[in-house]
Image (cartoon, rainbow, N blue to C red):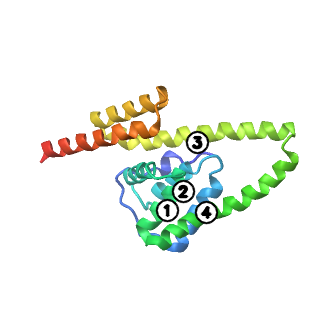
Amino acid sequence: MVPDSPSTAVPVTAAATAEPQLLELFVAFARMSLAGFGGVLVWARRAIVEQHRWMTAEEFNETFALCHFLPGPNIVNLSVVFGSRFRGIPGAIAAFAGLLGPPLLIVTTIAALYARYGELAVLRRALAGVSCVAIGLLFSVVFKMLTPLLKKRDPVALALFAGVFVAVGLLRQPMPVVLMVAIPLSIAVSFVARGRRA
């Protein structure tokens, strides 16, 4: 299944629509989690940015970047941050429950079945296929999240991005160490750039 199509894409600077209610938050994140076998991020971005337009593409990228600094899975952090942004603590709880509730029931059932039938060859081949699909979806959403950065054509931001990619992806440096260098550097660069524009 393709996450989206060019006809559904929206401008990266499109304004967000009305703020979601608690039930909307729960249902939206439940649908994301049920659709996102192998990776919810793809569906979260599609629902938040393109379907509901609760955030622009840039706001989503900034919020997701913030979630990397918090402990725990990024998508879970995103649900809490996103829900609390619009509805406070009740919103965070609604989004969190929607994200984890339905999958928890499904995974518990599947785990029981896997414990009984996990040695079957056909099941192992099916799981290998699912892994390939998950990797493809991940590449798709990474490309989408890069689009706002590429459209800005900011050489400093692109250089920081490339530096972090090389450090973590190629040189295999620990993420905390890279962030301890990249965060102060990016803040300093942004501060200097704003000072020149002022």
Which residue is pictured at 69% across the width and 60% down the height? 104
Q: Amino acid at mark 3?
A: Leu
Task: Relative to 28, say whether 22 is above or below.
Answer: below
Q: Which residue is mark 1?
A: 80
Which residue is pictured at 68% across the width and 39% down the height? 131
Q: Which residue is mark 4?
A: 30
Task: Relative to 57, say whether 170 is above or below.
Answer: above
Q: Residues within 10 Å of mark 4 (few under 14, many from 20)?
A: many
Q: Residue furthest top?
A: 171
Q: Nearer the viewer, mark 2 or mark 3?
A: 2
Q: Amino acid at mark 1?
A: Val
Q: Amino acid at mark 4?
A: Ala
Q: Between disc 4 and disc 1, whose residue precedes? A: 4
Q: Distance from label 4 to label 3 (Cα)?
A: 19 Å
Q: Which of the two residues, 128 or 104, is positioned nearer the viewer here?
A: 104
- The picture places residue 169, in percent across and down from the top left corner, at 48, 30
Q: Can you tell which mark lies on residue 137?
A: 3
Q: Amino acid at mark 2?
A: Val
Q: Distance from label 2 to label 3 (Cα)?
A: 18 Å
Do residues under tags 1 and 3 come within 8 Å of each other at their CB atoms?
Answer: no
- The picture places residue 166, in percent across and down from the top left corner, at 42, 28
